[in-house]
Image (cartoon, helix red, strand yellow):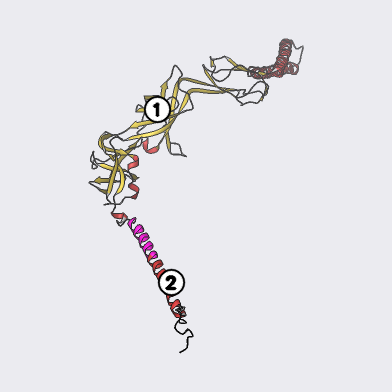
């Protein structure tokens, strides 16, 4: 028996064997599948969440079926009287543009300014008329010379006529002396007429107020050269103010003299009542309007002329009406379209229009007082639409 050691059993050592390649590939595929599945699930969850969030904010109620917000006003009981309104102008009782009428000259002085109170005959301005004055003096001297010569010829003609009876002169000579005397007399009259004309030119150099009043404007200053017809200053008389206006031809009877007129002056905010003082008997051929005037005594001169007046003349008789603001309806020919609120529903209505004054519509009483009328929001309404009243105005 051999004592040599047996290495056969101890040589069997346990060694881990590496996994095969197919198994590793399968495991990697499984991991990819798990990741993809988790990503798809996550995406589906996020998409579902977003879809739920979007759908939760969508209004499922149709716009036509939702109540529309509006504000309303209550129709008021009122009286309406038909009227006519006109725009008038305040004119002075008298007005004059003062300037030379016969002579051209330089302006020497202008003694007044706008607002000055002047009396009749008061000097307003003067012109430099030295040339006209010298011409007038020359014409006057010529007239005196002609007068002296004419007197001498007249005396000579008388003496010649006396000698004619004694036969000392011929009839022809006597007639010639009389003709010379008559010619000189005619020249004398022509010289006097020329002197009168020159005197008028000299008088035209001093410009005076034709009546008592106030200076409205000053158009030139000293040193300016003016010609006949040019105005230096203008004068107005406001003791009585004429309110003038034009009425359509169909209102000829409305503006009959004596008719009461309500007036409002925009410049002073005054309100007065007057009567038509006069009316033109014919219409203007171009505009077919009739001119009428109202006299307003103004001794304190508080009304500025050339300004605007609003005139109102009532016609017919007062009648009951329902009043609503102008903004609550659409005005058509003789009618208005509006919406009333009945419960929670808007109803379209067309109501006859009686008239309009100062932003208020006066309607036929078929629209009963107390009815709620849509004021704001009516542009989006149709008949039968549900409404939600947000505000109510009780007064106009």
Q: Magenta part mainly helix, strand or loop?
A: helix
Is 207 covered by the magenta stretch? no
Find out whether residue 57 is within the magenta segment.
yes
- In percent of width and height, residue 161 lies at 71, 12
Split into 4 quadrants, where in the image is the C terminus?
Answer: top left
Instruction: Identify residue for label 2.
Output: 32
Residue 386 in the image: above or below residue 14: above
Q: Is residue 216 left or right of residue 84?
A: right
- Locate residue 47: give its quadrant: bottom left
Visible residue check, residue 181: no
For the residue pair 21 and 217, the one nearer the viewer reads as: 21
Residue 210 position, x and y percent, is 54, 18
Boundaries of the magenta span: 42-59
Image location of residue 311, percent across then percent down: 39, 30
User: In this figure, which residue is indicated by the disc labeled 1?
Assistant: 264
* Residue closest to the eye, 341 or 197: 341
């Amino acid at each position: 028996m051999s004592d040599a050691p047996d290495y056969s059993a101890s040589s069997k050592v346990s060694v881990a064997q590496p996994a095969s390649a197919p198994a590793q590939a399968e495991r990697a595929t499984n991991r990819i599948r798990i990741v993809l599945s988790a990503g798809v699930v996550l995406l589906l969850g996020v998409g579902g969440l977003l879809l739920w969030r979007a759908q939760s904010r969508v209004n499922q109620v149709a716009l036509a079926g939702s109540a529309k917000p509006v504000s309303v006003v209550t129709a008021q009981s009122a009286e309406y009287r038909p009227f006519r309104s006109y725009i008038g102008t305040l004119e002075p009782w008298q007005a004059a543009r003062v300037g030379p009428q016969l002579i051209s000259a330089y302006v020497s002085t202008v003694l007044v300014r706008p607002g000055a109170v002047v009396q009749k005959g008061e000097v307003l301005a003067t012109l430099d008329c030295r040339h006209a004055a010298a011409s007038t003096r020359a014409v006057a001297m010529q007239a005196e010379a002609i007068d002296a010569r004419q007197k001498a010829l007249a005396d000579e003609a008388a003496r010649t006529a006396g000698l004619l009876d004694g036969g000392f002169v011929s009839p022809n000579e006597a007639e010639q002396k009389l003709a010379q005397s008559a010619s000189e007399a005619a020249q004398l009259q022509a010289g006097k007429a020329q002197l009168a004309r020159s005197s008028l030119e000299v008088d035209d150099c001093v410009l005076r107020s034709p009546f008592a009043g106030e200076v409205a404007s000053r158009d030139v200053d000293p040193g300016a050269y003016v010609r006949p017809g040019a105005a230096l200053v203008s004068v107005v008389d406001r003791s009585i103010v004429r309110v003038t206006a034009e009425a359509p031809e169909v209102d000829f009877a409305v503006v009959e003299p004596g008719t009461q007129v309500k007036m409002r002056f925009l410049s002073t905010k005054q309100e007065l009542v007057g009567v038509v003082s006069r009316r033109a008997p014919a219409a203007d051929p171009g505009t077919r309007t009739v001119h009428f005037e109202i006299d307003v005594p103004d001794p304190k001169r508080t009304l500025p002329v050339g300004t605007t007046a609003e005139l109102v003349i009532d016609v017919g008789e007062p009648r009951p009406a329902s009043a609503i603001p102008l903004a609550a309806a659409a005005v058509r020919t003789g009618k208005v379209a509006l919406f009333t609120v009945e419960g929670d529903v808007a109803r379209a209505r067309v109501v006859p229009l009686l008239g309009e004054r100062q932003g208020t519509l006066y309607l036929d009483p078929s629209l009963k007082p107390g009815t709620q009328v849509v004021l704001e929001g009516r542009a989006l309404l149709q008949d039968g639409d549900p409404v939600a009243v947000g505000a109510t105005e009780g007064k106009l």
